[in-house]
Image (spheres, helix red, strand yellow):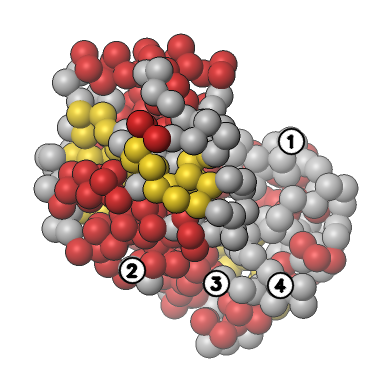
Amino acid sequence: MLKKLSIRDIDYQGKRIFCRVDFNVPLDEHNQVTDDTRVKASMPTIRHIVNNGGRLILASHLGRPKSGPEPKFSLASVAPCLAQYLGKPVKMAPDCIGPDVSHMVAQMKDGDVILLENVRFHAGETKNDPEFAKALAENADIYVNNAFGTAHRAHASTVGVTHFLQPAAAGFLLEKEIKYLGQALAYPDHPFVAVIGGAKVSDKIAVIENLLDKVDTLIIGGGMAYTFLRAMDRPIGRSLVEADRIDLAKQLLQKAADKDVTLLLPQDHVVAADFSADAEHKTCSDANFPADWMALDIGPATIATYTGALKNARMVVWNGPMGVFEFDAFARGTMAVARTLAESRARSIVGGGDSVAAVIKAGVESKMTHISTGGGASLEFLEGKELPGLAALTDAKG
């Protein structure tokens, strides 16, 4: 599936390894890591390099600093968490390039680990500036990309650096992501069901179009469903609708019909007087949808239909919630999808930040076949796009 050089194919002993990881983790007001999922997911690659005598230089971004260094986005907050998982000290670099970093790297022994400062503290990172990429590369012998979450970005640390640093190999996490997402698209088990949710159709157009060529059933929920319902002239009250996407929704409905794909939309709704956690709410059908209320979740009849389709599936790709699950009153639909997937025999692949958060909220993350660490990257992969960070890696031989 992944026809790129693997970290399994490289001798690390005594070599300096520049490894791009994704440590873009949430921090609290005291700069403490509140969710270390991405750090944990990186550990197999990190341990493999360290245990095989590599001198490991880790690079990542954190947040979106606007202009230069900002203390709240320093990766120094992540270093203690990393050291705890690794069971050995991790040296924190004052920057990601420059003489101080070069000096630290020159002092490294086999098995040592350095964490560079946030690459986005330099404007050259997001601009994929060749000089910045060259500066990143000059302290290393080998490049490894383990950051699936940024593989859709053509940045200096994901693409530019490979022009100066070869071989360029895929880490275990990157391999795992491509394996599961790639199998879903290329060799799906049937019945194959896609569950697509979230607020806007415009965010998921390409995903829906690509999946309509592959799935047996497409389930649509969340705010985006109401653009489709409006396209069908069904009552939606004050629900979210993208007026400029109604014609597109009609085209997608027609494509589903032409491809003989079962497309499921809400048949009843949990509606609210306003958008808030404690809003007055009730369940309604199309027939009694209040003109001045908005839908914030799918109703019980829709839950029964959706979960019925999931119980019969052999493969499920899920991207996006069924409602405003952050508010408990409107979380039932999303929680039902999560729990049904947890109990099903289907291979379940969950991609997208909100879907992952929902699975964690439901407490069923261990029951999913694969949970993607990359929201935007998994979306673009499901759209059928080539990911720049993946394309930049060295091709595998044979």
For the residues carrying marks 3 and 4, which lies nearer the camera in this image?
4
Q: Amino acid at mark 1?
A: Lys
Q: Amino acid at mark 3?
A: Asp
Residue 273, above or below 214: below
Q: Are marks 4 and 2 in contact (CB under 8 Å)?
A: no
Mark pair 4, 1: CA separation: 29 Å
Q: Are marks 2 and 3 in contact (CB under 8 Å)?
A: no
Closer to the N terminus: mark 1 or mark 2?
Answer: 1
In the image: residue 98, left or right of residue 118:
right
Closer to the N terminus: mark 3 or mark 1?
Answer: 3
Mark pair 4, 2: CA separation: 24 Å
**Res 115 quadrant in image:** bottom right
Closer to the N terminus: mark 3 or mark 4?
Answer: 4
Closer to the N terminus: mark 4 or mark 2?
Answer: 4
Write the residue at 72% across / 40% down: 126
What is the secondary structure assignment of the residue under circle 3?
Answer: loop
Q: Which residue is mark 4?
A: 28
Q: Which mark is residue 195?
A: none
Q: Which residue is mark 1?
A: 127
- Evaluate whether residue 390 shows in this view: no
What is the secondary structure assignment of the residue under circle 1?
Answer: loop
Frontmost residue, 307 versus 205: 307
Closer to the N terminus: mark 2 or mark 3?
Answer: 3
**Res 61 quadrant in image:** bottom right
What is the secondary structure assignment of the residue under circle 4?
Answer: loop
Q: Which mark is residue 36?
A: 3
